[in-house]
């Protein structure tokens, strides 16, 4: 039996709305990996659709938490960072990467700041600049098309995305991260959606597309990257990990569409987790 792997998830805790840590904790655990949580902020809900949400910025707690983990000798096989409550958290997270990573720690940065051609509430160019710096320290980045535009300065285009357009985004992203780029939310035509991946070390490109479902739910990017991070620290091949992560998102969305869950409340991944765990064990044997 393999030793239990551990990921540090650096993300916000939105108490309602299923994104960030409330997704990472169950998904990473269901993939058979321990999820240590470092909250960047506590919000009553996420910031999309909801209004009047409460926000508690936890910037002052993050380095002390990391120092305690370091003092206790906690080993991390992966660090996955996502939503930041301010651009200043980029410097803090960068310091945390240096403090708690080892030579064998996989660093994944999801530059969570935008979707559908616009920034999330309270975000702008300063956040893009903070993420540009953080992406340089990552082995893997997982921007969606909108985030890729803000990171690279390429103009946003809605779907369908031509090969030329995707290559332009990848060219810009390659300048920011020398590792693996996994561009999400790519629609080669009206009926398909998926990811295009570029490996900076081998120079190989791959793509994974599924049927496009007629809905968009909040938090699906967090489901995808949480799953990906867990599978990768367990040693899955990147293409297989991307495929299964995309399947978890798709299956969760299909279930949510069937039960009519409002889009801002996130997907019903919970109902998929038993099947997902079986798929993970089948993949990793
Ligand atoms: O899922 C992205 C996300 C994460 N965290 C918070 C958000 C959003 C998107 O709006 O508001 C707090």
Image (cartoon, rainbow, N blue to C red):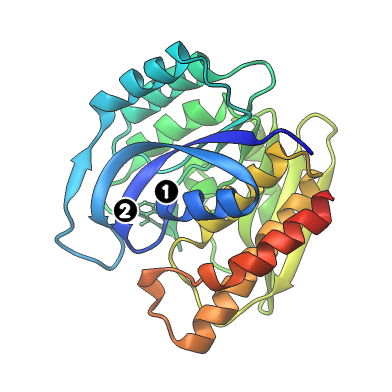
Q: Position of residue 15 (x, y in %)?
A: 29, 56
Q: Report the front residue among 128 and 78.
A: 78
Residue 213, percent from left and from top: 60, 79
| In front of the other: 193 or 32 | 32
Residue drawn at 51 percent across, 18 percent down: 100
Q: Which residue is mark 2?
A: 14
Residue 255 picture quarter = bottom right
Image height check: is 275 above or below 74?
Answer: below
| Residue 206 visible to the viewer | no
Q: Is mark 2 within 8 Å of ligand 1?
A: yes
Q: Which mark is residue 51?
A: none
Mark 2 falls on what kind of element?
strand
Q: CA distance from mark 2 to mark 1?
A: 7 Å
Marks 1 and 2: in contact by CB < 8 Å? yes
The residue pinned by badge 1 equals 21
Q: Residue at x 69, y 79 (%)?
A: 191
Is residue 46 shown left or right of residue 284?
left
Determine the image quadrant of residue 203.
top right
N-terminal of the pair, mark 2 or mark 1, is 2
What is the total number of numbered labels drawn onto the structure image? 2
Residue found at x 60% / y 65%: 273
Task: Determine if the C-beta at disc 1 is less than 8 A from ligand 1.
Answer: no
């Amino acid at each position: 039996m393999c030793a239990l792997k551990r990921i540090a998830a650096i993300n916000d805790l939105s108490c309602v709305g299923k994104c960030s840590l409330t997704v990472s904790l169950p998904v990473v655990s269901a993939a058979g990996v321990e999820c240590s949580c470092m909250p960047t902020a506590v919000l009553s809900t996420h910031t999309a659709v909801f209004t009047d949400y409460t926000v508690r910025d936890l910037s002052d707690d993050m380095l002390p938490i990391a120092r305690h983990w370091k003092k206790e000798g906690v080993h991390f096989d992966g660090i996955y960072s996502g939503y930041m409550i301010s651009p200043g958290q980029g410097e803090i997270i960068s310091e945390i990467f240096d403090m708690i990573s080892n030579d064998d720690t996989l660093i994944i940065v999801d530059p969570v700041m935008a979707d559908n051609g616009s920034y999330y509430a309270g975000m702008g160019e300063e956040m893009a600049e903070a993420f540009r710096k953080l992406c340089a320290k990552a082995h893997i980045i997982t921007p969606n098309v909108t985030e890729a535009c803000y990171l690279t300065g390429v103009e946003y285009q809605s779907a369908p995305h031509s090969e030329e357009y995707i290559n332009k985004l990848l060219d810009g992203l390659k300048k920011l991260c020398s590792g693996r780029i996994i561009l999400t939310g790519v629609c080669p035509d009206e009926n398909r959606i998926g990811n295009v991946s570029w490996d900076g070390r081998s120079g190989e490109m791959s793509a994974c597309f599924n049927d496009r479902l007629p809905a968009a739910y909040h938090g699906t990017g967090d489901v995808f990257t949480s799953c990906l991070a867990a599978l990768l620290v367990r040693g899955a091949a990147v293409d297989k990990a991307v495929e299964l992560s995309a399947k978890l998102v798709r299956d969760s969305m299909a279930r949510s569409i069937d039960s009519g869950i409002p889009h801002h409340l996130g997907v019903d991944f919970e109902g998929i987790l038993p099947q997902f765990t079986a798929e993970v064990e089948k993949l990793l044997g």
